[in-house]
Image (cartoon, rainbow, N blue to C red):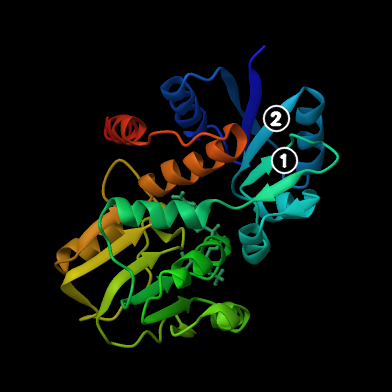
Amino acid sequence: MSALFAVIGNPIEHSRSPLIHHTFAEDVGIALTYERIWAPVGGFTKAVQAFIERGGRGMNVTVPFKVDAFEFAHQHTARAQRAMAVNTLDFANPEKIVGDNTDGVGLIRDLVFHDVSLTGRQILILGAGGATRGVLAPLLAQKPAEILIANRSPERAYGLVEEFSAIRGETTLRGCPSTGIDAQPFDLIINATPASLSNNLPPLPANILGKQSVVYDMAYGAEPTVFARWGEQHGAQALDGLGMLVEQAAESFKRWHAVEPPTARIRALLREQIEQ
Ligand code: NDP
């Protein structure tokens, strides 16, 4: 019998994680079953326990359950602890369930894949939710000159700045309201809000992009997002979160199977599918 894995979320029907993990498994010659599990809000624990009873070996966790998963795990990796959110559960020992967070590494690997340099750069992050929390430490580890976090509710941005200031090193780490972004040029602007999913563009001042700038939307879709279009209109290179999705999955796969899967085939396959 092949090992059993799943992704849990609400909604979940459009998740591409089963395709990604089955492709990885095929590429490295591992047999596995990977399902989608829908759970009602408030029903996370019950659904996960039922999955473990069926022999579940590991699980990815998506919106809105990453904090529930953090609370459910008995142990956390350092990066999950810092993010206070879990996107990967490891049930190898059901008495000692480990929670990991691979989102940050996924973003960095995707940026590296696209040759986006981070060291010494000016970075603006829009949003101060779970995704920003998950990517902050790996971004700081790349030693950018500055990270400015802009959020609709500014206190959440200030809270993250305070929390992560101990590991900021030489990087200037600041927070501001989303309407208070400095009109200074940024090398990289990361949209870590779901605004694009409802076709909304967070407020952005003019002249914060140069010809070498990159805009990165964690969201993705068949068409370039409104944020990606805004970036391109201002001369920047625009990237979306499809590569991050693949790379965070690769890191989960590595945790469960102790082998790093190749990501090129699934990157191309997903891009093709999404644009159909
Ligand atoms: P959260 O709900 O934890 O946080 C959302 C953040 O965005 C909050 O700071 C919120 O502000 C802000 N926000 C929400 N709606 C708007 C809006 N319409 N305009 C401006 N700001 C808004 O979500 P996550 O951090 O978990 O996820 C953020 C996005 O990143 C989602 O689209 C998610 O799908 C994507 N993502 C993609 C991944 C990938 O692999 N590609 C991985 C992880 C996340 P406030 O604090 O004021 O409420």
Q: Nearer the viewer, mark 2 or mark 1?
A: 2
**Precedes in sequence: disc 2 or disc 1:** 1
Picture disc at residue 40: 1
Q: Position of residue 63 (x, y in %)?
A: 59, 49
Examine the image and state in which quarter residue 32 appears: top right
Judge whether 59 appears above or below 239 on screen.
above
Q: Residue at x 60, y 53 (%)?
A: 101
- Quick one: 223 or 29, which is closer to the camera? 29
- Answer whether residue 198 is visible to the viewer in this image: no
Q: Secondary structure at mark 2?
A: strand
Q: Which residue is mark 2?
A: 57
- Answer whether residue 232 is visible to the viewer in this image: yes
Q: Position of residue 43 (x, y in %)?
A: 78, 42
Examine the image and state in which quarter residue 231 appears: bottom left
Q: Residue at x 46, y 63 (%)?
A: 193
Q: Is residue 191 left or right of residue 91?
A: left
Label 2 is placed on what type of residue? Arg
Q: Secondary structure at mark 1?
A: loop
